[in-house]
């Protein structure tokens, strides 16, 4: 088990409480909160948590970074923190200097592939890029004759077609048509597109786990406040059972994401076991989103369907997150193919490998 | 909520993994020697005293108990590995499993010394079967409605009444029974129940078989007519068994047996689907494997937390709730996924036979060991809703 820095977690919690309170953000007339929140995170070194101190980052452990992202999930923070952390991690691992500012990554769908021409220009389309419009930089995984490269691209140099996504954070289409990156480096040894998605999927699993914990609390609190048929709705057995199911799915997400994160933290290399843990986590947290969000809305009734209530700040992001870096279906096909390929008698050894 | 839900990412320690290899060797030898047939034991009774004795001889019963009672003072995580390996191969553990999981620990905690010294070594030797006398004709999930009476008499108690759905009572030497020693009070309807150790091999007890819908004799009706139980067979506090029962539930509910009961269908599904599945079959298998993996991680986590002295009560109930629903839905999902597999007999006859059996037993999985409805009530209580 990896130790998490509790001081760091406390400090980050304070920032989110002060500057990313879902209710405050929900009623804000402008987007001014965003730069205040981002600056506070940047000043605390949280945006470059996974960049080593030598390269201008704060050099936090992977475990610390993942825990920060679980917290971001608990607050449904509408900023590209996970994306920026991942971008910084990719750049540093490729020995590329990391800029400050908001970053995102591309591609975030397993089937999208960006090519790099002989003269180092990027060609291709990446769909559903989170915060594509908002981010200053995009860190792109591209293939130059099948050799993976990491490049840093300015958002201004791409064609970006906005798509709000379910949450409004943006799931944008980025077109690279002979785009010249600011910096390029070959990807680290043994790095593959799958490893890129593995990190992304673990980030999303942690955010999902965080957000599910929050909607469980929202729903249980609300059920104890709301009176119908002359009693608190939490006293009705049908409602209790729904909330128990919501708690179970939240528990599943906590366990699945926690196990995947722990695996990544302690892995020395990317291998079949890492794939197994992370694909399972993304599949299972994604499934939990469907069930849990539906119950949270059911418990909240009409008020939860309004813009003024904060529930949607969580559920809409949860629905976005389960699509990023591979949906349940995409990961399940890959995992199922692996299991089938290994054969029936190798299933139990795989399950009990650790 | 009183406390946040917690699932520490616990891994099995190296000694447990070493033990796993030993257990696998043992099981392969047993299968090779005809000790049991992994594809057929599930359809039989699973009761095999000689097999249990061989398991006992290996030191795999009562693993966590003190050595002075024949135990082995190993960890819960080591026991976990033995349990899951035996389950995965459908080993015939019926003769010893209940005593190993539940009855032994109850005796350890509440029985008189001479009883512990007498019975526990027999259990660990694999030569003693226990059954659990909880349910009655009018008391199942609602345990506190139990009405079988224990009336004070000279030197002990007289038992009168009926226990029902008592698995393995026809083969067991002992029962740990829950009997009514006083009426419930207005303030506490759980009051008035007491646990006793019952020697089943004595007059005053009639055991009648109740066959289940899968054609198996597992359940029994157990009638008590003026059965005498001596004072020293009382377990724990008179009238307060409800306090004793609840603390053990996390162990009972979070083990691998709580989600592996129909597991045998899954490898056979992978076998009939073959090495090159289409996207539909691959996705289906991928989801099932991801779900099972996550359940196992949750279950290992709960057992690791128990080993560390924590009390993951809500987490244990969640494992059973999610686990039994998973194992119950597995046959139906496997049926869907195998729908387009050629049905030439050589190809899928074994799968079909196992699937049929699993489909037949699936309905009981969300009933035994606390119904899904009861578990959700417990989880709801943990959330502070009742």
Image (cartoon, rainbow, N blue to C red):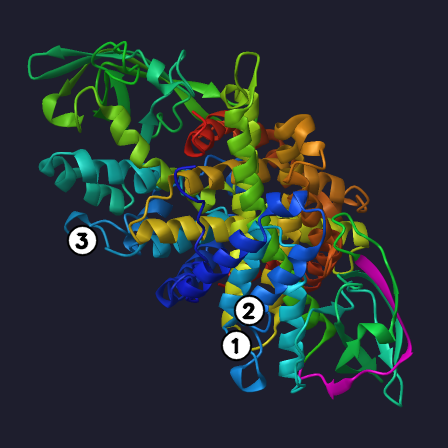
Gap in angstroms between the C-alphas marked 3 and 2: 52 Å
**Disc 3 or disc 2, which is closer to the eye?**
2
In magenta segment, residue A178:
yes
**Subunit of mark 3?**
B
Assess disc 3: are there few (<14), some (14-19) or many (≥20) residues with their C-alpha within 10 Å of its C-alpha: few
- Relative image position of residue A250 (x, y in whole percent): 55, 44
Task: Determine whether label 1 and label 3 are within 8 Å by CB.
Answer: no
Residue matched to label 2: A46
SS category of the residue bearing label 3: helix
SS category of the residue bearing label 2: loop
- Where is residue B40, by image quadrant? top right
Assess disc 1: are there few (<14), some (14-19) or many (≥20) residues with their C-alpha within 10 Å of its C-alpha: some
Residue farthest to the left, as pictured: B154
Type of secondary structure dominating the magenta stretch = strand
Q: Identify the residue at horizontal 67%, vertical 35% (top origin).
A: A294
Residue matched to label 1: A58
> Foreground residue, A190 or B220?
A190
- Relative image position of residue A49 (x, y in whole percent): 55, 72
Residue matched to label 3: B67
Magenta-tinted stretch:
A171-190
Is residue B269 visible in this depiction of the protein?
no
- Relative image position of residue B218 (x, y in whole percent): 44, 27
């Amino acid at each position: 088990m990896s130790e998490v820095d509790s001081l760091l977690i406390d400090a980050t919690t304070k920032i989110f409480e002060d500057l990313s309170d879902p209710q405050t953000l929900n009623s804000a007339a402008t987007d001014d909160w965003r730069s205040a929140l981002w600056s506070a995170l940047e000043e605390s070194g949280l945006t470059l948590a996974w960049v080593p101190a030598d390269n201008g980052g704060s050099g936090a452990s992977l475990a610390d970074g993942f825990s920060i992202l679980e917290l971001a999930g608990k607050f449904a923070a509408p900023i590209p923190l996970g994306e920026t952390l991942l971008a910084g991690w990719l750049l540093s691992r490729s020995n590329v200097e990391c800029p400050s500012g908001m970053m995102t990554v591309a591609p975030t769908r397993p089937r999208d592939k960006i090519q790099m021409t002989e003269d180092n220009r990027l060609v291709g389309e990446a769909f559903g890029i989170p915060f594509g419009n908002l981010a200053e930089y995009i860190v792109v995984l591209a293939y130059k004759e099948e050799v993976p490269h990491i490049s840093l691209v300015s958002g201004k140099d791409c064609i970006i077609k906005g798509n709000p996504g379910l949450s409004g954070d943006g799931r944008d289409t980025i077109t690279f048509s002979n785009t010249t990156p600011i910096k390029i480096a070959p990807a680290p040894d043994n790095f593959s597109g799958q490893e890129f998605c593995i990190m992304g999927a673990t980030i999303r699993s942690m955010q999902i786990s965080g957000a599910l914990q929050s909607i469980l609390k929202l729903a249980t609190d609300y059920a104890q406040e709301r009176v119908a048929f002359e009693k608190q709705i939490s006293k009705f057995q049908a409602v209790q059972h729904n909330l128990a199911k919501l708690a179970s799915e939240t528990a599943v997400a906590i366990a699945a994401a926690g196990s995947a994160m722990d695996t990544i933290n302690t892995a020395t290399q990317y291998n079949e076991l890492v794939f197994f843990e992370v694909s399972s986590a993304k599949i299972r947290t994604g499934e939990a989103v469907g069930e849990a969000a539906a119950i949270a809305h059911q418990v909240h009734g009409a008020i939860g369907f309004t813009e003024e209530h904060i529930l949607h700040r969580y559920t809409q992001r949860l629905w976005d997150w389960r699509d990023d870096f591979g949906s349940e279906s995409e990961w399940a096909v890959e995992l199922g193919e692996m299991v089938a390929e290994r054969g029936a008698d190798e299933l139990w050894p795989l399950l009990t490998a650790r | 909520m009183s406390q946040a839900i917690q699932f520490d990412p616990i891994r099995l320690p190296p000694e447990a993994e070493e033990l796993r290899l030993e257990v696998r060797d043992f099981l392969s030898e047993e299968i090779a020697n005809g000790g049991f047939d992994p594809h057929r034991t599930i359809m039989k009774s699973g009761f095999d005293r000689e097999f249990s004795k061989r398991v006992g001889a290996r030191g795999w019963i009562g693993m966590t108990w003190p050595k002075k009672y024949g135990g082995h003072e190993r960890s819960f995580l080591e026991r976990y590995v033995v349990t899951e390996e035996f389950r995965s191969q459908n080993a015939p553990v019926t003769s010893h499993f209940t005593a190993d999981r539940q009855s032994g620990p109850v005796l350890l905690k509440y029985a008189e010394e001479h009883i512990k010294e007498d019975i526990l070594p027999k259990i660990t030797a694999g030569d003693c079967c226990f059954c659990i006398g909880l349910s009655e004709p009018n008391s199942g999930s609602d345990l506190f409605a139990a009405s079988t009476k224990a009336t004070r008499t000279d030197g002990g108690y007289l038992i009168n009444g009926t226990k029902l759905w008592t698995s393995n009572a026809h083969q067991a030497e002992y029962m740990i029974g829950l009997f009514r020693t006083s009426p419930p009070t207005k303030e506490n309807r759980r009051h008035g129940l007491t646990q006793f150790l019952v020697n089943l091999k004595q007059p005053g007890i009639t055991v009648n078989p109740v066959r289940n819908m899968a054609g198996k004799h597992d359940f029994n009706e157990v009638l008590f007519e003026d059965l005498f139980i001596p004072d020293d067979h009382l377990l724990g506090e008179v009238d307060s068994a409800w306090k004793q029962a609840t603390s053990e539930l996390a162990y009972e509910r979070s083990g691998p047996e709580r989600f592996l009961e129909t597991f045998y269908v899954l490898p056979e599904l992978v076998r009939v689907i073959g090495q090159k599945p289409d996207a539909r079959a691959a996705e289906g298998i991928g989801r099932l494997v991801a779900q099972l993996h996550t359940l196992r991680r949750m279950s290992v986590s709960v057992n690791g937390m128990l080993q560390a002295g924590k009390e993951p009560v809500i987490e244990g109930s969640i494992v059973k709730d999610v686990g039994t629903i998973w194992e119950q839905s597995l046959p139906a999902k496997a049926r869907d996924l195998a729908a387009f597999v050629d049905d030439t007999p050589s190809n899928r006859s074994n799968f079909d036979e196992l699937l049929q059996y699993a489909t037949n037993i699936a309905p009981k999985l969300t009933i035994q060991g606390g119904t899904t409805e009861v578990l959700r009530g417990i989880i709801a209580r943990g959330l502070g809703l009742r």
